[in-house]
Image (spheres, helix red, strand yellow):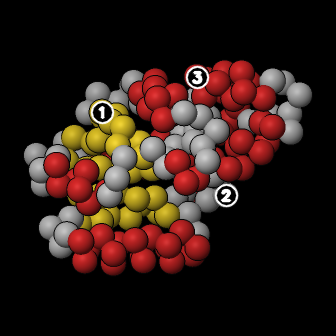
Amino acid sequence: MKRAIVPGTFDPVTEGHLDVIRRASQIFGEVVVAVAESPGKGPLFSHEERVELVRQSTADMPNVGVEPFDGLLVEFAQSRGPSVVVKGLRAITDFEYEFQMNALNYELSNEIETLFIMSPPKFMYLSSSVVKEIARLGGAFSQFVTPCVEEALVRKFGRG
């Protein structure tokens, strides 16, 4: 059984992230969503909050598990045994960054393969940053996130 690892900061998890996770779960027998600590990005939600929001948001996906991690993705992947890293791509800027990360990860461990899943048009513009900005400014954002994430953002920003 092949295992996929879908890494990210997920600050917060969006419907775009969930699309990639769901599609990976249809291809692979087991999917591990690896929630990176990412302190350098200055996340809005704590590492524990982000892990819990992803767990709640993926609860309807029986072959998906969620784990926190800190450190190098290749080391996390190696610790889980043979696996494929799955990344979502929205635009050419994602491709450039992910292409560089893939090359670096390959230098660190050529045993880890990366699979890219292209976003459908309805998610090509969607990012955690955009969702946070809409929420911060009091706009409607419920269509971009699960109810638990909507509630968490309302707690952080209020209804403006």
Mark 3 is surrounded, within 10 Å at the Cα level, by few (under 14), some (14 to 19) or many (20 or more) other residues, namely some
Q: Horizontal placement of 138 versus 65: left or right?
A: right
Quick one: label 1 or label 2, which is nearer the N terminus? 1
* Residue 145 x/y as whole percent: 62, 35
Q: Horizontal placement of 30 versus 66: left or right?
A: left
Q: 122 and 79: which one is in front?
A: 79
The answer to whether residue 21 of the structure is visible from this angle is no
Which residue in the protein does label 2 denote? 125
Please, what is the three-letter code of the amino acid marked with disc 3? Cys
Q: Do the residues under discs 1 and 2 have CB atoms within 8 angstroms? A: no
* Residue 74 x/y as whole percent: 26, 60
Q: Quadrant of the C terminus?
A: top right
Q: Residue at x 32, y 64 (%)?
A: 115
Alpha carbon distance from label 3 to label 2: 22 Å
Which residue in the protein does label 3 denote? 148
Which residue in the protein does label 1 denote? 65
Mark 1 is surrounded, within 10 Å at the Cα level, by few (under 14), some (14 to 19) or many (20 or more) other residues, namely some
Alpha carbon distance from label 3 to label 1: 17 Å
Please, what is the three-letter code of the amino acid marked with disc 2? Tyr
- Front of the two marks 1 and 2: 1
Alpha carbon distance from label 1 to label 2: 26 Å
Residue 9: give its label: none
Mark 1, secondary structure of its residue? strand
Mark 2, secondary structure of its residue? loop
